[in-house]
Amino acid sequence: MKRTLPILVVLAVLLAAIALVNPFFLEPAGFLAFVKRAAPLVILAAGQYFVIVSGEFDLSVGSLVTVEVVVAARLIDGQESATWWVLLLLIAVGLLVGLLNGVVTTALRVPSFITTLGMMLILSGAVFLWTGGAPRGALSEAFRTFGRGNLGPVPWSVLILLAAGAAAILLMRSDFGRRLVATGDNERAAALSGVRVARTRILAFVLSGAAAAITGILLGGFAGVSAQVGQGLEFSAITAVVLGGVALGGGRGSVVAAMAGALTLEALFTLLNLYGISGALEFTVQGVIIIAAVAVGALRLPAWLAKHPPRKQGDTHVA
Amino acid sequence: MNGQSLKQAGRPARPAVAALREIDPTKVIYLALAATLVIGWVLVAVDGGDFLTVETIVGIQQRSAALGIVAVGQTLAILAGSLDLSVAYLISLCSLVAAETMAGRDGGIAAGVAAVLAVSALVGLVNGMVITRLRVHAFIATLGTALIIKGVVDHLYDGPAGSVPDSFQRLGYDRIGPVPVSALLWAAVAAAAWFLLRRTRLGHRIYAVGGDEEVARLSGVRTDRVVVLTHVLCSVCAGVAGLLLAARLGAGAPTVGTDGGYDLESIAAVVLGGTALAGGKGGVAGTVGGVLLLAVLDSVFNQLEVNSFFKDVVRGLVIVIAVAVYARRRKGRQI
């Protein structure tokens, strides 16, 4: 909780700042619209969290999201009847890509940065090789409902986000969650105390793949089919996780904070838009804030822990 | 005196011992490069083409020069246990700085080059200081810098701007026999980096910091200073690549760095060359091999007129497989 608090405070401040400029934000509809827009990134960040807390990276999620959307469009091709088996297939693709990432990283001992970088090239190359360079086909109405439709007053994507968030929290409270954090904190100690380190990490990658599949399904509905739909999402997800105070290199941070980090990032975009800092300079502000947020987090640690020895030195450096 | 000479002897020992114990990945990459050349030559010959023409060889060098220069700089940062994701946007920025400063005048060349070197060194300094002083992970620090530069460049420019004089464009296109000037520039940068790493104190310190920062610090290395310096050098290399690309385009372009994918591609080339991503192991020779391998692959595919998306698939596979092979050779050690 102590580690989750700072990001929740930042999030609350940002949300309050948005509400000041735009009172509509305080109404349920306005707020739900914000959460709906943020849902894909929050789910993706939760998936990325599992991988990062186990001490690895997943750079392949951005192109995996693109693959999911492009594959869905081509296979469904506007037929409503195809929706359900395609949805199942998409989830399976996500799980499979995660499994491959995990196995190559653990069994072949390729650093995950390289494994998932290679996977990113392979995925984006393969999918456009298959469709001939540009997305083809169309999504069905039933498919798009998940990303942009509502169940009563509540958007489907918000419900899916709540379910995914609850599942992530439960997972982190289970034995698996403890094993995952132990693996990222000290691989050797975890292995010596009986954790099957490789299996735990593979599962983390599989979860990230599944999260990317769900994100793809939501974004396909929300934003439609394009070749750029997943572009840069891997960096946004990693940024969100790190904003939440999760240490790159593993072993530190909570999944709630990671998801709050994603909401914060989305709130930041919204706020910048409201204040008219749109377009290119948005990136500059984003860059400054990311560095500043992480720096503040890193600087605060020694002061807090002045009485206690730091638990792990140098975890701010390269994993 | 005795202790001094012991220390002197001790410094280079680490890479040397490591090289004895493990088969050198540099050899693997050059073997792979030779194999790719032979296979490519056969494939192109079967296809009815002629692979080893002067044109192809010049093409390979032209294609690899810019990436090669960036990758040499990236090697320094990675060896020190860091990495730099901001090089792609920095390249775009530097191409614009060069073209805007020169503004087509011959007299502006010196000023343009100086401005690019200053801007890139400053960006490297900022990267290094954020990483060491603010203790921000290199991944986030350089990603943040990348976003900052992207924002500034996209805000100021919509398309190509400025122009470089004809005399400067010769850097991009002239060649001496079969060797383009740009390749010579790359060779000079690589040789300088090789000399730095193998023959100077700073070089040994870079290996020490990348191998184990804490041990290096306890042995009296000012680790922060080393990390900052590698980032300055890495950014300056990106600046030089920006100059080269400006010379080739005749103008500055806000997307030239990202279109080339120089950030991830340079990291891939470094790792393909056998440098450990965690730092402390590897070198420039491997990186040069890695860049050449990527360029030869590209050239073979171009001649066979293979779909560009298929190229990406193969490139991804090659990178992962190569690193898996190196990992096998380093049995018992996690990279």
Image (cartoon, helix red, strand yellow):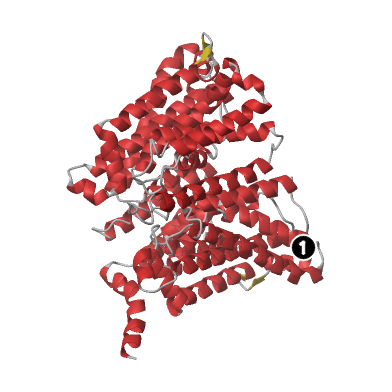
Q: Residue at x 53, y 24 (%)?
A: A35
Q: Chain of mark 1?
A: B
Pick the front one: A7 or A288: A7
In the rendered structure, the answer to whether residue B278 lies left or right of residue B141 reads: left
Which residue is at 37% across, 47% downward? A112
In the image as oriented, which residue stretches furthest toward the front?
Answer: A307
Does residue A280 appear to the left or right of A35 in the view shown?
right
Judge whether residue B303 can be spotted in this image.
no
Asked which secondary structure carries label 1, the reply is: helix
Q: Which residue is mark 1?
A: B101
> Residue A84 at what x, y percent from top left?
42, 15
The residue type indicated by label 1 comes to Thr
Quadrant into which the N terminus of chain B falls: bottom left
The C terminus of chain B: image quadrant: bottom left
Q: Position of residue A16 (x, y in %)?
A: 59, 29
**From where the camera sits, is residue A27 visible?**
yes
Q: Between residues A182 and B313, which one lies in front from this camera angle?
A: A182
Q: Residue at x 67, y 55 (%)?
A: B93
Residue B62 image-quadrant placement: bottom right
